[in-house]
Image: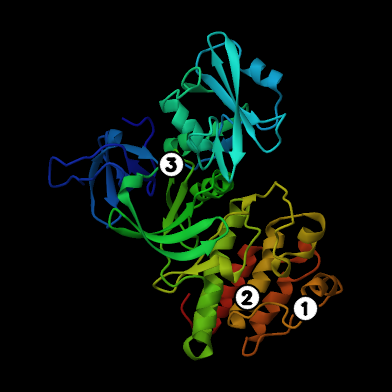
Amino acid sequence: MTETPWPQGTECVARYSFKGTSEHDLPFNKGDLLSIIVVTKDPNWYKAKNSAGREGTIPANYVQKREGVKSGGKLSLMPWFHGKITRNQAEELLVPPETGLYLVRESTNFPGDYTLCVSCDGKVEHYRIIYHNGKLSIDEEEYFENLMQLVEHYTKDADGLCTKLIKPKVEEGTVAAQDEFSRGGWSMNRNELQLQQVIGKGEFGDVMVGDYRGAKVAVKCIKNDATAQAFIAEASVMTQLRHDNLVQLLGVIVEENGSLFIVTEYMAKGCLVDYLRSRGRTVLGGDALLNFTLDVSEAMAYLETNNFVHRDLAARNVLVSEDNIAKVSDFGLTKEASSTQDTAKLPVKWTSPEALREKKFSTKSDVWSFGVLLWEIYSFGRVPYPRIPLKEVVPRVEKGYTMDCPDGCPEVVYNIMKMCWNLDPAARPSFQMLKERLQHISKGMGKKL
């Protein structure tokens, strides 16, 4: 029995299978996603619906509420990895001696290599992990792709070590990402995911179309443990956000060998910039373009309300569904509004001057990017600042240069772009204001919202 009733719309995941005992029940399988409609007179039962829209009663203690993964500590795929610590520091961390307690650190004597430190029979043994031809090994007989694979192997078999690895010594302040996703109800079963064809390639790995329990899904497949660590942050942000115009996270799979799969809803028509370029003016009328801008403004107003800054808003990071709904994606740089960030990898043409100059990110810097995104939409996917060399873009913008109105773009929409490109962040409109203004334009044109 749950202690306090869950509100309508609460998402939950089935902890066990339920066959149902009457025609009013809603049968489900372990791992199914359900949405609460209402608490019944008996608090042990909820009325709920499944992803196909079928409704019925379900036992409250068979389901787990899905919660945002928001750990105060650092989410880590390798909570036993302590980075640059000395041999003595490692030994202090593994005292009192507990056979099988272990950690991994960077090697002090051999930069680029690692050291596995294991407590065994009252003392600490240090094993050098050699990095050779892109693989890792302790005995130069068994080779591993990454640290997670190596540690996983020695937890199953001592294989020449003084003991097998039994208990990780977790770095202070870190939390095992696998445990957090599981606790929040976001872990998926790898055996139920069939990967099909590659639909995108990135430096991190592939994006693939997959099938999860009969539903078409998109899957980011990240093979390298260091890269996977960076994507854990993206996945944790996605667990906290839910809106019809944001690409929805469905779940996460963390494999013991260091592979990470981020499973999201499948967006059949791909990214907005390619969609605009491939269809062009002959296919897309003014109402379609305006609907895309409205969809994005809805998503960004939601992020604004929840104090999240996207930091990489651009047409390439907006995806289009089968029924032409635009949804904001790629939360790799998204952070709560208070944090700062390295600007080395930022897209210059989309980033506000103050974010580039002072690393000051805010909803107002997202508003600047939204203005550039509007220009992309109304120019059918052209690259911003055409004919201006990249190194000249920032100096010219800071002197007050703004892009011309795209051909065929209504003056009222171009005026919104210019409001977004105010050099004073405080003078830029909020996303709530932008959304209302675009809705007003849409009504004035007699088009659907």
Percent x, y of residue 43: 29, 34
Disc 2: which residue: 374
Residue 319 appears in the picture as rendered: yes
Percent x, y of residue 106: 66, 32
- Indicate which disc, 2 or 1, sits on the residue closer to the N terminus: 2
Disc 3: which residue: 255
Q: Circle 2 sits in a helix, a strand or a loop, which is it?
A: helix
Q: CA distance from mark 1 to mark 3?
A: 48 Å
- Is the residue marked by circle 1 packed among few (<14), some (14-19), or many (20+) residues within 10 Å? some
- Name the residue type under label 1: Thr
Q: Nearer the viewer, mark 1 or mark 3?
A: 3
- Indicate which disc, 2 or 3, sits on the residue closer to the N terminus: 3
Q: Nearer the viewer, residue 168 or 392?
A: 168
- Name the residue type under label 3: Glu
Q: Circle 1 sits in a helix, a strand or a loop, which is it?
A: loop
Q: Is residue 245 above or below residue 441?
A: above
Q: Residue furthest left?
A: 22
Disc 1: which residue: 402
Q: Is residue 9 above or below residue 111?
A: below
Question: Which part of the image, by quadrant, shows the N terminus?
Answer: top left
Percent x, y of residue 236: 53, 45
Q: Nearer the viewer, mark 2 or mark 3?
A: 3
